[in-house]
């Protein structure tokens, strides 16, 4: 396997990073991502039960895989799974591109009693019922180009979030995809999560037949079969770099080109000025009802659990 590399070298870290690649001879592209300390920071903001902890970790890995495809340093990707009747009412994770890398955050809302009834290993349907998956790409305006927003919504189907994302791409964009995710709580109680997303490149833009009208995809079937040999525990093994995994999977291919590598980290975007601006739009009577005895409206950030005490007097200005 030859690996022409872009101007940047492979990110040296084995965690909190994402690696992009293409296999041109097979019309395939992909991403590998692994989260460690950044994942710990996000999960530590809430005392999630193990089932929700694992689910949110999977969502954050998927968000890192998808978000790292953004083409500029001001874009945002949001992954949201939601239902009205399941044990998990809302699962949301987002990725914001920045010059330093990808910024992640996420949280889950769930009904604890319903979750207990499901047992230790509930199915995706058990967690969400008839829910839906929404993925939103927001590309910021750069270099004179207008901002672009694209959202796809599909039923939340499959045995896992990864399977639901495969279904999403096949149904909304007719792009065959392979997803595998691993989540592992280590002996020292730290948590590691990793994942891979491999896709068949769309064809047909220059006179060739559209991908979705073809019934045979031998090149994709080959890449999908190789990808399926990857085990979940390899994705969480910090002794394996992401480039090592790439080598194990595709070293017999003519060329694998590394297209990008990105650092991943957590940083919440909650902001007191933003909360103050929102509260100032409420009528005075409603603000007074929100305030405690000390005259503070305590705003709790759902993502990081930070509490911002905002005084009624400060909203009068």
Image: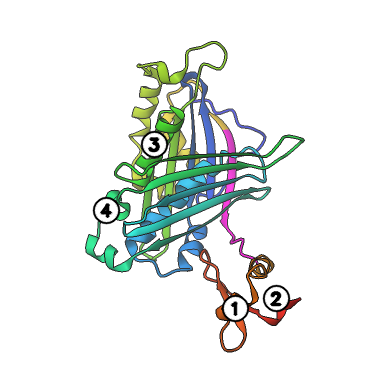
Front disc: 1 or 4: 1
Residue 166: which numbered mark, if any? 3
Secondary element at tag 2: helix
Q: Nearer the viewer, residue 89 or 48?
A: 89
Instruction: Quickly name the residue at label 4.
Output: 126
Q: Residue at x 49, y 43 (%)?
A: 135
Q: Determine the residue positioned at 49% across, 62% down.
A: 42
Q: Is residue 22 above or below residue 184?
A: above
Q: Position of residue 177 (x, y in %)?
A: 41, 32
Q: Position of residue 208 (x, y in %)?
A: 51, 12
Mark 3 to mark 1: distance in Å? Answer: 43 Å
| Marks 3 & 1, CB-CB < 8 Å contact | no
Q: Up-down: is 94 above or below 180?
A: below
Tag 2 residue: 315
Q: Name the one closer to the observer, 88 or 74.
A: 88
Q: Earlier in the sequence, mark 3 or mark 1?
A: 3
For the residue pair 38 and 92, the one nearer the viewer reads as 92
Q: Is residue 256 visible?
A: no
Q: CA distance from mark 2 to mark 1?
A: 10 Å
Task: List the residue tagged with mark 1.
Answer: 297
Q: Nearer the viewer, mark 2 or mark 4?
A: 2
19 displayed left or right of 164: right
Q: Are marks 2 and 1 in contact (CB under 8 Å)?
A: yes
Predominant SS of the magenta segment: strand
């Amino acid at each position: 396997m030859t690996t022409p590399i872009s101007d940047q070298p492979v990110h040296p870290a084995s965690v909190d990073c994402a690696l992009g690649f293409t296999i041109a001879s097979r019309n395939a592209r992909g991403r590998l991502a692994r989260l460690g300390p950044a994942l710990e920071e996000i999960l530590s903001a809430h005392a999630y039960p193990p089932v929700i902890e694992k689910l949110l970790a999977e969502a954050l890995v998927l968000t890192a895989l998808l978000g790292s495809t953004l083409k500029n340093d001001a874009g945002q990707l949001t992954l949201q799974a939601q239902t009205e009747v399941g044990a998990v009412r809302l699962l949301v994770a987002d990725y914001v591109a920045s010059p330093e890398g990808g910024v992640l955050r996420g949280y889950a809302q769930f009904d604890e009693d319903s979750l207990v009834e499901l047992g230790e290993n509930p199915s995706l349907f058990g967690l969400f019922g008839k829910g839906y998956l929404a993925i939103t790409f927001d590309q910021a305006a750069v270099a004179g180009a207008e901002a672009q927003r694209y959202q796809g919504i599909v039923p939340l189907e499959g045995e896992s979030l990864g399977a639901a994302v495969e279904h999403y791409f096949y149904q909304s964009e007719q792009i065959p995809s392979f997803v595998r995710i691993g989540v592992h709580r280590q002996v020292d109680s730290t948590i590691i999560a990793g994942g891979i997303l491999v896709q068949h490149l769309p064809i047909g833009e220059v006179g060739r037949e559209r991908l979705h009208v073809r019934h045979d995809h031998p090149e994709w079937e080959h890449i999908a079969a190789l990808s399926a040999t990857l085990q979940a525990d390899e994705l969480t093994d910090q002794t394996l770099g992401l480039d090592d995994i790439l080598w194990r999977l595709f070293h017999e291919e003519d060329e694998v080109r590394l297209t990008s590598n990105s650092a991943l980290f957590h940083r919440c975007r909650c902001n007191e000025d933003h909360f103050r601006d929102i509260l100032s739009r409420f009528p005075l009577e409603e603000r007074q009802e929100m305030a405690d005895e000390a005259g503070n409206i305590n705003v709790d950030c759902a993502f990081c659990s930070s509490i911002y005490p905002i005084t009624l007097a400060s909203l009068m200005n």
